[in-house]
Amino acid sequence: MSYVPGHCQLLASHRSRVSTLSGEHVNQSEGESPTVVDGRTLGFHLYGAPDGTPVFYLGVVDTGIAPDRPGIGKSTIHPGRSILGYPDDIRQLINHLGLNQ
């Protein structure tokens, strides 16, 4: 696959459906590595709804923390709770890690 500016998209055949602990299905790409103009490859994965608004995460920090949302990955589901309760989970994680800033 060659990189063509403005034409980089993931075909439906490259997506897989992942089940979360809650039984929810999340679309996730198998990953791609288009070739950029100077011949290098640029690996990436796409997550979420195919018709959603894309957001780029640029991992440019030395250290990062990426918690799983409730019911996804290694986090258990919290029945009856909305995403609005997630900040409290993050505060508890901050306390657990002993972070003060």
Image: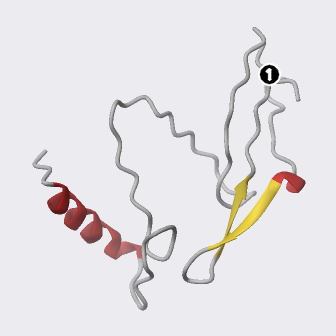
The amino acid type found where label 1 is placed reads Thr
Left or right, 89 with reference to 53: left
Foreground residue, 52 or 8? 8
Question: Residue drawn 73% across and 52% down?
Answer: 29
Left or right, 44 with reference to 60: right
Q: Which residue is mark 1?
A: 35
Residue 67 image-quadrant placement: bottom left
Q: Is residue 8 above or below residue 79?
A: above
Q: Is residue 76 above or below residue 33?
A: below
Q: Where does the image place residue 15, in percent across and percent down from the top left?
A: 79, 57
Q: Where does the image place residue 35, in percent across and percent down from the top left?
A: 79, 22
Foreground residue, 12 or 32? 32
Secondary structure found at label 1: loop
Q: Is residue 61 above or below residue 16?
A: above
Q: In which quadrant of the rendered image does the N terminus lie?
A: top right
Left or right, 89 with reference to 1: left
Q: Residues within 10 Å of mark 1 (few under 14, many from 20)?
A: some
Question: Residue drawn 73% across and 16% down?
Answer: 40
Left or right, 81 with reference to 55: left
